[in-house]
Image (cartoon, grey):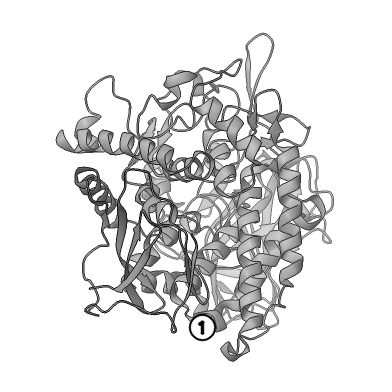
């Protein structure tokens, strides 16, 4: 039975109204031991389940917004201050790297046969640790005209005072292919620069003796208050940008009397991910559904519509009915090629990461990115529909509203295309992506297939086929893992079931040196994504199958905790190699694996069937046969706190939480 509740008019059973200071609890009579372990797992990972990095917008808000006002307040601030560039791309906001400043931190120029010039390494901790980045101490080899060098500052870098109207700063000679330099990235500052100034960067190609005055790319000027800022200049869009780069020249006009600081200028890989826009949209719409925060919606709707439109237009979604990534290095081809003789060729610039699985060259025609676009489209259709139904919200028309019915139709078209385009008929499962040459990549991506079911993109027959493979009822020719070995790690299925030593981004050029299962993206496993397994089982095989899998996870967790936790348990040989904090490993569950908090959410979103909406919530419980009831306490929804109990006989009770 499905319950639809509009808050403000719902009838609550009388109980104390004080807000609970504790983390919400999951309770099932007769299964106290399992619930104790589940609540412990939830508490263990909830405490660290927040980041400003856009990559986790699809998971951490989903897992934490319902647990209290602190989580809601943190994400409100994060979403309102998330960087969105002038074109509409939502920044990744991971740590500082040596590539596109709004993208993923790597591949870095140091890994790409590119070049970089740094007059300061202030705040570049990652580059110092991994590449021993040292700042320049002089301007040897540089050509500087129209300005005098004041100093080389440890924070600001090269400090110049403009003496002429035009300042020209030319780098020393270097040599790299344009394929590893789709962007030139500057970090610079200016004070006293004319408002009419138009900075630009020019480039010299190998074999050219003279600079071409008409060949340059402009970038935005800076003002006194801006401080050090990045400029990511898309040189790849310029006509004739192909060949070997040999120098950059930065030109700043109307500069006389101003002060210009140049911290760095580098050749930058396009490390943007095509998923940040839909993930941001998903996170924001989920925030609004949980909070009903109309003030947030009024303030952010223009940015949301801009982000949504960029995510559709940049990847030709309305035309192609899926995500096609057009960026340099993101065409789905591998950064490695192994010839018939076994000789390996590394191809810098190819195989750039596109999502959480950052070593794998998703891209081209991208199944995972299409899933996230599909979910964002559906959510945004619901949001625009709610805005239209509530004129009293006074939500502005900033960013040009979408027609909800058009978005809904587009979602249907994506679903139909997905089921045909990405389905491997021979293997009975979905591929990860299809590259620009038409080659499909199928390494037995369990996460792709489980998420396809979770997001509603798989047909019923496809879902059944996927589980006959995952549950070992059939084997796929060529797979390294089959049968019970797919769940060899107990807490989750292997991320992939076929050994991959040839399809990666080029900096990961020795995958064969790491044993099968000792790398997360090659036979390893991630705890958090068991959530999609549980939810997909619930949808496909029902609550008893999902409960059986959850019990297996909880038995593993109790065993791990009894031996002192993850690090102590996996320190013993033969149990697997943990990743976390830097070194590669096959198992991801702590430290940077923030998404581990997802697993307990099956209780709320799965078995209880709770869904927040703009007006309230719906509740569609699906309890295993041996559960007399399920109670989830401390559900923070639209300024109310509820304890909800679903009974085996179909009754649902909502009480004001403590």
Q: Position of residue 130 (x, y in %)?
A: 40, 41
Q: Position of residue 101 (x, y in %)?
A: 55, 57
Farthest residue toward the top?
341
Q: Nearer the viewer, residue 534 or 293?
A: 534
In the displayed structure, does residue 211 sit left or right of residue 48?
Answer: right
Q: Residue at x 55, y 58 (%)?
A: 279
Q: Is residue 325 visible?
A: no
In the displayed structure, does residue 413 sit left or right of residue 156?
Answer: right
User: Dot 1 surroundings within 10 Å: few (below 14), some, or many (20 or more)?
Assistant: some
Q: Secondary structure at mark 1?
A: helix
Q: Quadrant of residue 431?
A: top right
Farthest residue toward the front?
649
Q: Nearer the viewer, residue 118 or 386?
A: 386
Q: Residue at x 43, y 84 (%)?
A: 8
Specify the quadrant that holds the C terminus. bottom left
In the displayed structure, does residue 436 sit left or right of residue 450?
Answer: right
Q: Position of residue 141 (x, y in %)?
A: 59, 49
Q: Residue at x 27, y 62 (%)?
A: 24
In the displayed structure, does residue 214 sit left or right of residue 30?
Answer: right
**What count of labels does the image hold?**
1
Q: Residue at x 63, y 78 (%)?
A: 302
User: Circle 1 sits on which residue?
Assistant: 294
Q: Is residue 636 visible?
A: yes
Q: Position of residue 32 (x, y in %)?
A: 20, 47
Asked if 303 appears above or below 512 in the picture, the reply is below
């Amino acid at each position: 039975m499905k319950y639809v509740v509009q808050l403000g008019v719902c009838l609550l059973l009388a109980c104390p109204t004080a807000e609970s200071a504790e983390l919400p609890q999951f309770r099932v009579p007769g299964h106290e031991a399992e619930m104790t372990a589940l609540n412990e797992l939830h508490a263990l990972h909830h405490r660290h389940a927040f980041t400003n990095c856009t990559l986790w917008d699809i998971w951490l808000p989903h897992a934490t917004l319902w647990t209290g006002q602190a989580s809601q307040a943190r994400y409100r601030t994060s979403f309102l201050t998330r960087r969105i560039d002038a074109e509409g791309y939502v920044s990744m906001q991971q740590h500082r790297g040596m590539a596109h400043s709004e993208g993923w931190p790597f591949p870095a120029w140091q890994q790409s046969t590119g070049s970089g010039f740094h007059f300061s390494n202030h705040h570049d901790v990652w580059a110092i640790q991994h590449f021993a980045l040292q700042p320049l101490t002089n301007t040897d080899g540089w050509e500087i005209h129209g300005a005098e060098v004041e100093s080389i500052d440890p924070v600001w870098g090269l400090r110049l005072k403009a003496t002429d109207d035009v300042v020209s700063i030319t780098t020393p000679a270097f040599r790299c292919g344009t394929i590893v330099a789709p962007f030139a990235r500057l970090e610079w500052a200016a004070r006293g620069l004319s408002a009419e100034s138009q900075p630009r960067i020019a480039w010299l190609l190998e074999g050219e003796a003279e600079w071409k005055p008409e060949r340059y790319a402009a970038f935005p000027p800076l003002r006194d208050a801006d401080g050090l800022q990045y400029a990511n200049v898309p040189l790849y869009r310029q006509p004739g940008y192909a060949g070997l780069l040999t120098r950059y020249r930065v030109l700043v006009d109307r500069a006389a009397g101003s002060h210009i600081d140049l911290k760095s200028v580098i050749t930058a890989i396009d490390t943007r991910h095509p998923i940040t826009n839909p993930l941001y949209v998903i996170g924001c719409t989920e925030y609004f559904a949980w909070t009903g925060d109309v003030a947030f919606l009024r303030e952010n709707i223009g940015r949301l519509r801009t982000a949504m439109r960029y995510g559709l237009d940049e990847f030709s979604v309305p035309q192609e009915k899926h995500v096609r990534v057009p960026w340099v290095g993101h065409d789905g081809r591998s950064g490695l090629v192994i010839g018939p003789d076994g000789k390996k060729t590394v191809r810098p610039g190819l195989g750039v990461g596109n999502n959480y699985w950052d070593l794998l060259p998703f891209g081209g025609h991208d199944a995972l990115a299409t899933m996230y676009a599909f979910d964002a489209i559906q959510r945004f259709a619901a949001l625009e529909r709610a805005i239209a139904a509530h004129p009293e919200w006074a939500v502005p028309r900033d960013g040009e509203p979408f027609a909800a019915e058009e978005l809904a139709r587009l979602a249907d078209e994506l679903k139909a295309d997905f089921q045909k385009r990405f389905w491997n008929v021979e293997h009975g499962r979905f591929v990860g992506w299809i590259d620009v040459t038409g080659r499909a990549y199928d390494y037995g991506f369990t996460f792709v297939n489980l998420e396809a079911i979770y997001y509603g993109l798989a047909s019923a027959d496809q879902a059944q086929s996927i589980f006959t493979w995952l549950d070992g009822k059939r084997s796929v020719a060529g797979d390294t893992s089959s049968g019970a070995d797919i769940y060899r790690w107990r807490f989750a299925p292997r991320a992939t079931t076929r050994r991959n030593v040839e399809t990666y981004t080029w900096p990961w050029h020795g995958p064969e040196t790491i044993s099968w299962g000792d790398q997360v993206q090659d036979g390893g496993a991630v705890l958090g994504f068991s959530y999609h397994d549980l939810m997909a089982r619930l949808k496909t095989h029902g609550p008893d199958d999902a409960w059986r899998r959850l019990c297996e996870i909880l038995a593993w967790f109790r065993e791990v905790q009894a031996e002192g936790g993850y690090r102590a348990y996996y320190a013993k040989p033969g149990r697997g190699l943990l990743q976390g904090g830097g070194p590669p490993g096959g198992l991801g569950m702590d430290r940077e694996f923030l998404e581990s908090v997802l697993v307990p959410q099956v209780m709320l979103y799965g078995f209880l069937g709770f869904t927040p909406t703009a007006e309230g919530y719906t509740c569609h419980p699906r309890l295993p046969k041996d559960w007399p009831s399920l109670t989830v306490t401390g559900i923070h929804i639209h300024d109310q706190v509820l304890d909800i109990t679903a009974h085996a006989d179909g009754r649902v009770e909502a009480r004001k939480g403590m």
